[in-house]
Image: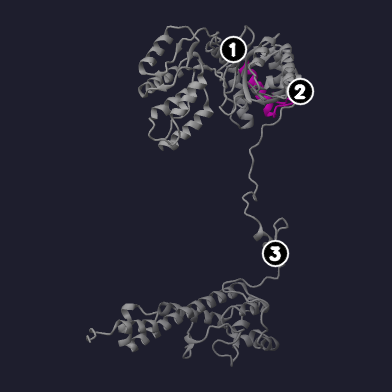
Amino acid sequence: MTEPKDGESFFRKVARFVANPTTEWAEINSRQDDPEGDLAKAELRAMVDRKRRNDFVRKRELDMLRRIRREGLSPEQLAALGSATSQLDEGERGSELNSKIDLGVKAKIDEIEQQMVGDAFAPTQLQRQHPPGFFETSTRPVHFSTTLNAEAPSAALDNLASAAEVERLRTAPPHAAATMGASMAPLSDAKPSVLPPALPPLDMALDLPLNFDVVPTPRASAAPELVHDPELDEAVIAFANADYDSCERSLIELTRPGGLRNLHGDTWLVLFDHYRATGQAAKFEALALDYVHLFGLSAPQWFSMPKLVAEAARQVRAPVGKAGSASWAAPAVLSADAVALLQTRCQNLPMPWVLDWAPLRQLDIEACGKLRQLFRLWAGQQIDMSWLSGDHFLQLLKELAPISMREVDPQLWMLRLEALRLVNRPDQFDEVAIDYCVTYEISPPSWEHTLCRVRVSGAGLSTHGPATTLQTELSSTAFMESQVTEQAPLPTRVQLELSGQLSGDISETLRLMTADLGESAAINVICPKLIRLDFMAAGDLLNWVLSRRSENRSVTFSETHRLVAYFFAAMGINEHATIKIRQV
């Protein structure tokens, strides 16, 4: 049999560790070899813990005695506090009656401070010697039992209190109604607090589901509904009749100092719109200074509506003419040479260019890059095109670039995105961009508006760019259809535009607007450049709105300036359509 190794066996150490689980493994042998040292350590640790506990209790007594000296408490409050604090000398309790300073209490405080800070404390009075075992006394709360010596009453208590009061204080008081914790204020005589009635009981609140709408959040204020303002009728009618001087005088009379609407900010904004519509910059600036001085708010920004209309007229493009024969027909396999031929042929032909995509079945990768560059070039130019079988071309690009197929060349995806941007389909562009990001895990290109105007024809889809724009000497109207998606061939909302000055018979303008409505259920007519319309034009517009309402369509006039908006209200158009005032 092999002899055991030097030292104790492993199992004996394990047994010793089980017997002393709080001892570190490295100290197992030392603990066994030196039991007296372990006992000394345990006694030292107990002494340190006892010293910390006594210091905490004395600090709490010191805080309580200081509060008694400062505030003065009634005997009932002292009885309540006695259940949570350590023993107080009976004579010291009686010395605090009626907030009088007792010398015995002060001596008690000095003694406690001396014990806590040691020799560095300079007592104000001669300190008494504590009996042996004073610091080892129990800290368990006892109702006003004496801490040091309960046999001899305090001399100060006999001098300050009557015999009956001394007898009462020497008698152990009954237990307090409530046991208070350390550092808690005495019980108050006030009535208990009650939860607000709007709050549910605690047991019910714990069972309620989690809800983040308990505290109401401020909602964005909706635009106020336009109503007819009779006090502005004189100015509004004068403006509709092109009597700008009378309109200005009427508004100035209302907003001048002492006028009926001197402090009515909306009336001031009507005058601002009058100066914008008539292009009077100097009067606008002078009015802005008075507005800032009176209301303390920033004045509206200046712009000239006649200038905006003139600039828009210079940028108006001619209507798209009828497409003749195809300008270019795609081959079955699109190559780089075919793309170069497409660019050359279109440069020498009048607009609109007609591109036939029906024969196309495959695209070369080099041709994809060339065609994408050509589409980007066309997107920044005012070009009119018509794509025959354009839906077939877009569907072919979709099939050639399936989602999650990383082996497909990214040029096909980029060409598809550029084609969707060229035909002005932002919704489909966003969907394809997300698929591109999922497939290649890189950021797709962002959407950009295009100046090119493309009509896509096919078996199921027809996407229109900006529609026909009509301009006459006195009236100007432009309108644009919204785009369609593959899932919804017919748009549900259409956007039209009215601009310039509308006077006399505007039936032709309204006829062109009606022709571009399609099956849209919501019609938004934007009017940021609509300067004025007279009574005859407003009557025709009211009849047009009523006809659209009879077709179960909603009509909204947005971005109108205030003189036009209040004229709509005076004519009753606001009763059948929504009028939104431009907030600038």
- Label of residue 193 in the image: 3
Q: Is residue 203 above or below residue 420?
A: below
Q: Is residue 541 above or below residue 67?
A: above
The residue shown at (65%, 60%) is 206
- Between 488 and 430, the one nearer to me in the picture: 488
| 274 magenta-colored | yes
Is there any visible trace of residue 228 in the rendered image? no
Instruction: Please indicate whether residue 537 sits to the left or right of residue 417 in the image.
Output: right
Residue 34 in the image, given as x and y percentages of width and height: 31, 87
Specify the amino acid type for callout 3: Ser
The C terminus, quarter of image: top right
Marks 1/2: CA–CA distance: 37 Å
Specify the amino acid type for callout 2: Glu
Residue 522, quarter of the rendered image: top right
For marks 3 and 2, give the one nearer the viewer: 3
- Between 330 and 422, the one nearer to me in the picture: 330
Write down the residue under mark 2: 231
Marks 3/1: CA–CA distance: 74 Å
- Between 33 and 499, the one nearer to me in the picture: 33
Number of other residues with Cα within 10 Å of mark 1, as a class: few under 14, some 14 to 19, many 20 or more: many
For marks 3 and 1, give the one nearer the viewer: 1
Instruction: Please indicate whether residue 491 sits to the left or right of residue 1 in the image.
Output: right
Residue 248, quarter of the rendered image: top right
Residue 7 in the image, given as x and y percentages of width and height: 25, 84
Whichever of callouts 3 and 1 sits on the residue coming sooner in the sequence is 3
- Label of residue 469 in the image: 1
Colour convention: one colour
Instruction: Please indicate whether residue 520 sits to the left or right of residue 312 in the image.
Output: right
Marks 3/2: CA–CA distance: 56 Å
